[in-house]
Image (spheres, rainbow, N blue to C red):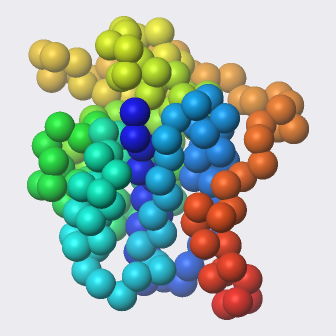
Amino acid sequence: MNILMVMPKSSHGEFFPIGMAYISSFLKYKGYNVFCLNLNSYDKPDYEILEHHIRKYDIKIACTGGISLFYTKLKYLVKVIKSIDQNIITIVGGGVVSSDPELILNNLKMDFGVIGEGEYTVAELVDAVTNKKDFNQIKGIIYKDERGMIVRTQPRPEIKDLDSLPYPDYAGFNVERYIEQS
């Protein structure tokens, strides 16, 4: 299963996507093929960049997220990804989803929202999508079922031992760019 982690282009200054970098490394640790895309690193239109990566890497799941400040960008990203390939599963996480999950699910039109810490949640969700398992048992997600009804699962407990996680995937998101700009 090929997964694309997408950092939205920001017009409010650049923030290193540390949460996505942790999720990327955790998914790689679990054996998934993860491709990272920092849209801030490109001057081309987002559509061109996304289409190139989606087609080149045969992406089946696209993950993105951020804080509430990124709401408009995230809504646009989900729309663009679905316009390129309607079958791509879209997952959005971060503070924007955790702050008001139902509102964000209804307005961003993503397939799944991740509420709270995403490392274990996204890994379980990718496993469920890959192996056609029931989503109800995955803690910390929101989605619409086949009838269009909102399903919000039980909250996921916070990770107690952060040292148990692999180091963040700095290379995938071009950390050198952030170092140069600081």
Residue 115: give x, y in percent of width and height.
51, 35
> 96 and 83: which one is in front?
83
How many numbered discs sit on the rendered protein?
0
- Near-viewer residue (101 or 44): 44
In this picture, is 114 found above or below 93?
A: above
Left or right: where 14 falls relative to 6:
right
Residue 106 found in image quarter: top left
Question: Which residue lies most toward the front here?
Answer: 56
Residue 33: image x %, image y %? Answer: 49, 41
- Image point (37%, 22%), residue name: 130
- Residue 3 placement, left or right of 115: left
Q: Is residue 102 left or right of residue 7?
A: left
Percent of width and height locating residue 7: 47, 64
> Residue 179's quadrant in the figure?
bottom right
Residue 152 seen from this side? no
Residue 42: where, in percent of width, then height? Answer: 40, 82
Where 15 sits versus 18, above or below?
below
Q: Quadrant of the C terminus?
A: bottom right
Q: Nearer the viewer, residue 141 or 84?
A: 84
Q: Quadrant of the N terminus?
A: top left
Q: Can you see residue 47?
A: yes
On the rendered structure, is 98 left or right of 152? right
Residue ID at (23%, 63%): 51
